[in-house]
């Protein structure tokens, strides 16, 4: 198991995930990141400070991939 971190990127900055989550594979981390992005999209409800992406990092702090948070109109 590896630990992955899911940072939320907005126009005003980055909300860092300091706890992370242990997952078996990078593909599992991608799926979790996609779920976080969907949740952020639904929670935004047209908010002016919408999330732009979920950045998935490994324990060394390197970004593995980034998942865009779709606009509500998409």
Image (spheres, rainbow, N blue to C red):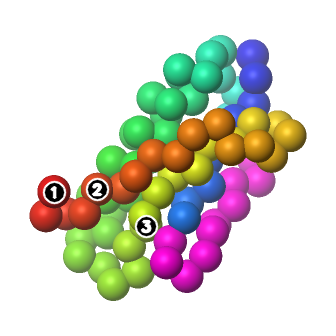
- C-alpha gap between disc 1 and disc 2: 6 Å
Of marks 2 and 3, which one's residue comes earlier in the chain?
3
Quadrant where the C terminus is found in the figure? bottom left
Residue 19 horizontal/vertical position (percent): 75, 47
- C-alpha gap between disc 1 and disc 3: 14 Å
Residue 72 horizontal/vertical position (percent): 19, 63
Whether 19 is drawn above or below 74: the answer is above
Q: In the image, which residues are magenta?
A: 10-19
Q: Left or right: 58 with respect to 71?
A: right
Q: Are marks 2 and 3 in contact (CB under 8 Å)?
A: no
Mark 3 lies on a secondary structure that is strand
Residue at image position (69%, 61%) is 16
Q: Left or right: 24 with respect to 39?
A: right
The residue that mark 3 highlights is 51
Q: Which mark is residue 74?
A: 1
Q: Are marks 1 and 2 in contact (CB under 8 Å)?
A: yes
Comparing labels 1 and 3, the label whose residue is closer to the camera: 1
């Amino acid at each position: 198991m590896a630990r992955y971190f899911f940072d939320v990127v907005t126009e005003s900055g980055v909300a860092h995930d300091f706890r992370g989550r242990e997952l078996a594979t990078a593909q599992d981390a991608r799926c979790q990141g996609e779920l976080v992005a969907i949740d952020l999209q639904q929670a935004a409800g047209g908010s002016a400070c919408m999330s732009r992406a979920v950045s998935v990092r490994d324990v060394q702090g390197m970004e593995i991939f980034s998942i865009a948070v779709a606009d509500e109109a998409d």
